[in-house]
Amino acid sequence: METLGKTAGIVSAQTNSTSGAHMAALDLTTHPGHLARRLQQAHYLLWNTMVSEEITSPQFAVLNALVEEPGLDQRTVGERVGLDRSTIAEVISRLGRRGLLDKVRDPQDGRRFLLRLTDEGERTHRKLSVRTARMNCVFLSPLSAAEQTVFCDLIQRVADAAEGLRNPTEPLVTQR
């Protein structure tokens, strides 16, 4: 078995017995997508055990956006929290059915609705905000305070750049 460069994400190469070609095993710890999926799994587990089994993280993000800026329309909320149109529509619908937000027709544009949290939505946000803070402490506990800041800055930069992938007409911008 031959060892190849770890920076290329290749751990070892084995010969395929039928074709004689080399099949390389990849070191997935060097693949950001794989690591992001693992982080998402850990976040999902912590969210369900420490924050809420009823309100999802994306639903909380919508509540949070409407606490910060009540009266946004659905499209704008989706943009603020990074949800596509179909996902934000479903999240808004679920929160409405739970009685956590109200839709009010926009007086300037009767075709769109503005969103506001109900009293129950505000109470739910306050309760989950405390739990979310605790969960984040656990989630980031392997890192020092300085590392947590750097980690969040870097992952925010990657997430912001990934938003550009949703609109392929705009050129991708890389920062160095």
Image (cartoon, rainbow, N blue to C red):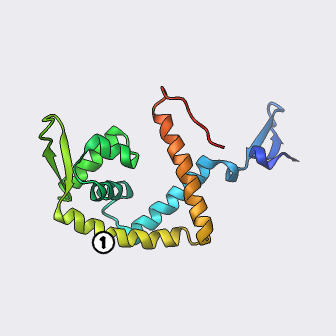
Categorize mark 1 by other alpha carbons within 10 Å: few (<14), some (14-19), many (20+): few
Residue 116 is left or right of residue 133, and the answer is left
Report x, y in % for residue 129: 35, 68
Q: Is residue 113 above or below residue 137?
A: above
Name of the residue lying farthest toward the top: 169
Q: Percent from the top left, x then y, of residue 51? A: 38, 69
Residue at (60, 53) in percent of width and height: 35
Residue 59 position, x and y percent, is: 32, 55
Above or below 136: residue 88: above
Identify the image quadrant of residue 153.
Answer: bottom right
Q: Residue at x 68, y 53 (%)?
A: 29
Q: Residue furthest right?
A: 2
Number of numbered discs: 1
The residue that appears at 26% across and 43% down in the rendered structure is 74
Task: Return the residue nearer the eye: 16 or 144.
Answer: 144
Decide if residue 165 is on the left or right side of residue 19: left
Q: Residue at x 14, y 37 (%)?
A: 108
Q: Secondary structure at mark 1?
A: helix
18 vs 35, nearest the viewer: 35
Query: Where in the figure is residue 15, as x and y percent of width and height?
Result: 83, 39
In which quadrant of the rendered image does the C terminus lie?
top right
Viewer-proximal residue, 164 or 91?
164
User: Disc 1 residue type?
Assistant: Lys
Residue 40 appears left or right of 90: right
Decide if residue 99 is on the left or right side of residue 126. Answer: left
Residue at numbered disc 1: 127
